Amino acid sequence: MPPLAPLRVYYDGLCPGCRRDRARYERWAGELGESVRWCDVTEHQQTLRDKGVDPQAALLSLHVEEADGTLREGIDAYILLMRRVPRLKPLAWLIGLPGLKPMLRKLYDGWVRRRLTREGRLP
């Protein structure tokens, strides 16, 4: 099997749940996870700005950069990441369904905003 093209994942490294999710992903992905570079948004703010992404927006929604520079965010970023882990592929398919995707996006966005507000990190 050819090596997977690398992904760069911009995630909230200050969020305990996000760090747990990253550790779980790495554990489940095994060797497949070696093609993923995890970048804490707070440490890569200028890199994000250079790519046209406001660091605050990156805190509000997961951003994944493909090898060709294409950026995906939110549910689309999760789908891209999940498709690399065999046990998560069915979930990636499910959350990508047209009727479910917008609802999940709204729930996810609301949850992130509440978390960041509670932590005092949302202006």
Image (tube, grey):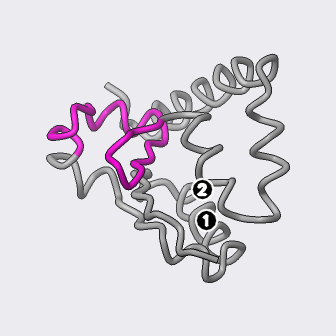
Quarter of the image that includes the C terminus? top left
Q: How busy is the neighbourhood of tag 1: few (under 14 within 10 Å), some, or many (20 plus)?
A: few
Q: Name the amino acid, label 1.
A: Arg
The residue identified by callout 2 is 17
Q: How busy is the neighbourhood of tag 2: few (under 14 within 10 Å), some, or many (20 plus)?
A: few
Residue at image coords 32%, 46%: 69
On screen, residue 30 above or below 52: below
Residue at image coords 44%, 59%: 7
On screen, residue 1 above or below 8: below
Under circle 2, the secondary element is: helix
Marks 2 and 1: in contact by CB < 8 Å? yes
Q: Name the amino acid, label 2.
A: Gly
Instruction: Give the numbered dot on residue 20.
Output: 1
Residue at image coords 24%, 58%: 43
Residue 117, position in %: x, y? Answer: 46, 30
- The residue stretch that appears in magenta: 48-72
Q: Locate residue 95: give its quadrant.
A: top right
Quarter of the image that includes the N terminus? bottom right
Q: Locate residue 60: give its quadrant.
A: top left
Q: Locate residue 104: give its quadrant.
A: top right
- Horizontal side of 105 relative to 66 (left or right) equals right
